Amino acid sequence: MKIVFSQIALTSLEDVTDFIRERWTDREMNVLRTDIKKFKQTLHDGIIEHQRFSDSPNLRFTLIGKRQVKLIYELIGEDVIIKLFWHCKKDPKKIKHFLKR
């Protein structure tokens, strides 16, 4: 299984970390980093199947960073494309706009 971060995912991860760095402690930032590592490991192990978006069955998501950040990814065959990191305090209606890019 290959895990690939899209350009939008990298940009959105940077935006999320900038946003939360101002509000969170270093310990909480480490929780976010650890959760991303755990996410990658669970994909490799095939342990957990995450929730799907109802209108797009290949898109899935999980909550990380004390359930404050939504990690959205797409399954394409055996590959996983990390599409977007979304802070849960943002307007959820805008997610579709970012995913269409």
Image: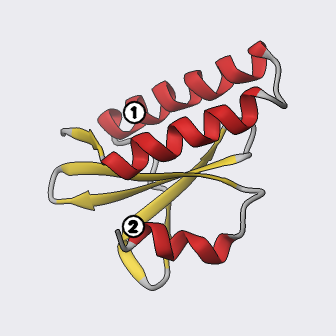
Q: Quadrant of residue 89?
A: bottom right
Q: Quadrant of the N terminus?
A: top left
Q: Is residue 99 above or below residue 34?
A: below
Q: Is residue 7 left or right of residue 50?
A: left
| Residue under pointer 2 | 59
Q: How many marks?
A: 2
What whole-number distance in Å separates the C-alpha atoms at marks 2 and 1? 16 Å
The quarter in which the C terminus is drawn is bottom left
Q: In this image, 27 relative to 39: left or right?
A: right
Of the residues under marks 2 and 1, which one precedes in the sequence? 1
Asked which secondary structure carries label 2, the reply is strand
Say if 29 sits above or below 76 in the image. above
Q: Can you give x and y, in whole percent of width and height, for residue 5 in the image?
A: 31, 42
Q: Say which mark, if any, is on residue 40.
A: 1
Q: Secondary structure at mark 1?
A: helix
Tell whether 40 sits left or right of 53: left
Of 71 and 46, the residue lying toward us = 71
